[in-house]
Image (spheres, grey):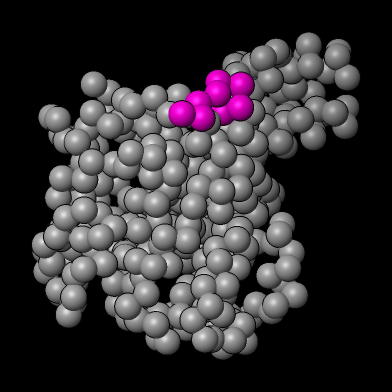
């Protein structure tokens, strides 16, 4: 039985679509709050919510969550039940059309930064059980419980959307203290959680991972995943530490200085930079490769530099190393590429 993939991001600070904030605002309105109250301090406006293509910073959504949690502190589970698969757009359609639940879970973890998660999920198979942990260690303490409940409830809701019979949850442990009533937990998850635990962990019968999904369609999932790949690539280029590294690598001389030079410019150690990039789902090597490819194409098409000069400017000790890398990027040599343009 194959294992589940590692999540592509390990921290909640990634840009996200506007749909979650819209959902939170709608829920707030249904429970007596005004849009202005729930958006207060976020920098978002009702007009922004009307733009279905808009993106928000994670901290903007976090502010909206905090406003809602302050007014309705026990609403985390109820909010999570509003997150049906269709709320995630093309991302949701991708895992709805996956062949099996395992494929859907792996796809969700690969494109986790297309979700609205704040408590970071990790999943693995242990013998005949699937273990899912929601890591809340980086969440602000005042909203940690609310977000864990929301995210857990949202995951459960999507799993039921995918497989109407529901995921067979075997046990549930939560870090926060036991609330005054656990009826809502028992009604939603079909069991009584253990509170005050060391982690937020749910165990499922692993056989559900290989259940075929009723809406599976190989053509649809391939198309949806291609669109997910493009969307997440665009977002990663525009935001966060990866964006800062790319910007610095394009400056003259930065390629030669390598990771230590970029880390120094960013005011951090190479170890910290490496960790931050890993949390963002990338690496310095990947970003360096990406920037080199873009610069190589630009420098070659001007016709002003020889292949050897381009190799030197990109930080390669030998032209042969550059030619090998270029073939990996483009499937052809620099000379053949030039002949074809």
Range shown magenta: 214-221
Q: Judge left or right: residue 299 versus residue 27.
A: right
Q: Is residue 217 magenta?
A: yes
User: Residue shown at 39%/82% (left/top)?
Assistant: 72
Residue 172: quarter of image: bottom left
Count of all numbered marks drawn on residues in the image:
0
User: Residue shown at 57%/74% (left/top)?
Assistant: 25
User: Residue shown at 50%/47% (left/top)?
Assistant: 85
Image coordinates of residue 297 in percent, x first then y, are 76, 30
- Front residue of 225/216: it is 216
Answer above or below: position of 283 versus 3: below
Image coordinates of residue 223 in percent, x first then y, are 64, 28
Q: Judge left or right: residue 194 versus residue 183.
A: left
- Front residue of 264/102: it is 102
Q: Judge left or right: residue 228 versus residue 186.
A: right
User: Residue shown at 86%/14% (left/top)?
Assistant: 340
- Front residue of 30/333: it is 30
Image coordinates of residue 320 in percent, x first then y, are 61, 16
Residue 229: quarter of image: top right
Task: Tell me if residue 257 can be seen.
Answer: no
Answer above or below: position of 91 versus 16: above
Q: Is residue 276 magenta?
A: no
Looking at the rendering, in which quadrant would you find the N terminus? top left
Image coordinates of residue 203 in percent, x first then y, are 18, 45
Task: Tell me if residue 39 can be seen.
Answer: yes
Answer above or below: position of 105 versus 78: above
Looking at the rendering, in which quadrant would you find the C terminus? top right
């Amino acid at each position: 039985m194959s294992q589940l993939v590692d999540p592509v991001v390990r921290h909640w600070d990634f840009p996200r679509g506007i749909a979650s904030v819209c959902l939170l605002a709608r829920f707030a309105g249904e429970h007596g709050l005004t849009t202005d109250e729930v958006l207060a301090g976020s920098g978002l406006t009702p007009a922004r919510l009307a733009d279905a293509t808009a993106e928000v910073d994670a901290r903007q959504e976090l502010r909206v969550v905090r406003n809602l949690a302050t007014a309705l502190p026990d609403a985390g589970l109820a909010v999570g039940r509003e997150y049906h698969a269709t709320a995630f757009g093309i991302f949701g359609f991708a895992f709805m059309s996956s062949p099996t639940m395992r494929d859907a879970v792996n796809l969700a973890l690969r494109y986790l930064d297309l979700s609205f998660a704040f408590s970071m999920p990790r999943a693995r198979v242990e013998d005949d059980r699937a273990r899912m942990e929601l890591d809340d260690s980086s969440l602000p303490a005042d909203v940690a419980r609310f977000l864990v409940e929301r995210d857990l409830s949202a995951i459960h809701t999507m799993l039921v959307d995918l497989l109407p019979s529901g995921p067979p949850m075997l046990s549930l442990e939560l870090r926060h203290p036991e609330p005054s009533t656990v009826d809502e937990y028992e009604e939603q998850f079909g069991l009584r959680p253990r509170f005050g635990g060391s982690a937020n962990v749910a165990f499922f019968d692993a056989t559900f991972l290989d259940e075929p999904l009723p809406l599976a369609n190989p053509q649809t999932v391939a198309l949806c995943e291609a669109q997910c790949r493009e969307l997440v690539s665009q977002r990663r280029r525009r935001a966060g530490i990866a964006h800062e590294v790319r910007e610095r690598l394009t400056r003259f001389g930065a390629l030669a200085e390598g990771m230590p030079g970029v880390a120094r410019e960013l005011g951090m150690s190479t170890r910290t930079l490496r960790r931050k990039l890993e949390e963002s789902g990338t690496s310095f090597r990947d970003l360096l490769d990406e920037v080199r490819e873009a610069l190589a194409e630009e420098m070659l098409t001007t016709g002003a530099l020889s292949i050897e000069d381009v190799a030197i400017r990109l930080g390669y000790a030998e032209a042969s190393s550059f030619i090998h890398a270029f073939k990996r990027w483009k499937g052809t040599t620099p000379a053949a590429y030039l002949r074809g343009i």
